[in-house]
Amino acid sequence: MNYIAPSILNADFAHLHRSIEMFNASEADWIHLDIMDGVFVPNISFGMPVVAAVSRITTKPLDAHLMIVQPEKFIAEFKQLGVNILTVQYEACTHLHRTLQQIQQAGMKAGVAINPHTPVSVLEEIAAVADLVLVMSVNPGFGGQKFIANSADKVARAKDLLLRKKSAALIEVDGGVNRHNARLLRDAGADILVVGNAILAANNPTEEIAVIKNL
Ligand code: DX5
Ligand code: ZN
């Protein structure tokens, strides 16, 4: 799969509709929503009212990435707001298997994200359940950070594990992705590339989406 999911984290929130309308008219496949609680990560981003606003005006599936503790508390609410793919952090879930099943039972695709320090091997027993594996290529918390160099190798290791486990889970990569590393990540097995700053800081964001998608 060859998807691109623009992140709104570094958008101008006073004019958020402009970014969403630009994504609607672009080759973007999903819209990536980064929810941060100031506890799991050292930053607070946005919450339900913003998700609801994006949901009202977007024509693209919503891909929500929860960087929060106790994400299981909010599964029903995200479903109600129109989220299609809900990803939780491995490090924030004591009962990850149950949480992924609850997300699926609510009618969404269930993703599990792993931080840069978390080895791919923790996915061994969950690979068969997850619909998506998100490999973090920066430490979560902020947009516009530098891509961690060994992340493409990590994607390749995740791909191997999923094949070995006969899992159909998709691989998403998030953090510091741009036109210079996108090809490498796709070759390593990435299905969905999350791109924030590289799109929003580009002179022509619509064109940047097309360039990265079609590399
Ligand atoms: C980081 C977020 C990412 C980030 C991507 O905590 O999960 O989705 O916003 O933005 P860039 O592409 O700017 O790293
Ligand atoms: Zn994210």
Image (cartoon, rainbow, N blue to C red):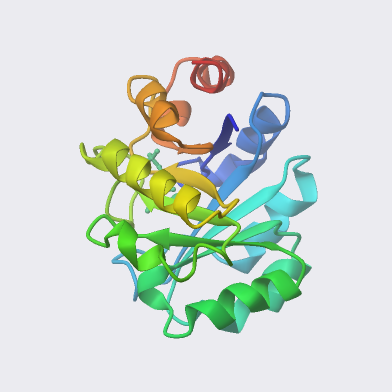
Residue 43 seen in the figure: yes
Q: Within the image, what quadrant is residue 75 found in?
A: bottom right
| Relative height, residue 33 to residue 5 (above, below) | below
What's the residue at 33%, 51% (across, down)? 142
Please report the residue visible at 49 percent of the width from the left and 78 percent of the height from the top. Answer: 96
**Residue found 39% across the figure and 20% down from its top:** 179
Where residue 60 sits: x, y (%)?
A: 73, 41
- The part of the image, by quadrant, that contains residue 144 is top left
State which quarter of the image contains the N terminus: top right
Q: Is residue 40 left or right of residue 169?
A: left
**Which quarter of the picture shows residue 23?**
top right
Residue 175 appears anywhere in the view: no
139 with respect to 172 (left or right): left
Position of residue 155 relative to residue 208, above or below, is below
Which residue occupies the foreground of this view, 205 or 114? 114
Q: Is residue 119 left or right of residue 134?
A: left
Which x, y percent locates residue 70? 48, 82
Counting labels gives: 0
Q: Nearer the viewer, residue 4 or 10?
A: 4
Where is residue 126? Give x, y as percent.
Answer: 49, 69
Name the spot of residue 27 as percent of width and height, x first: 66, 24
Q: Is residue 139 left or right of residue 54?
A: left
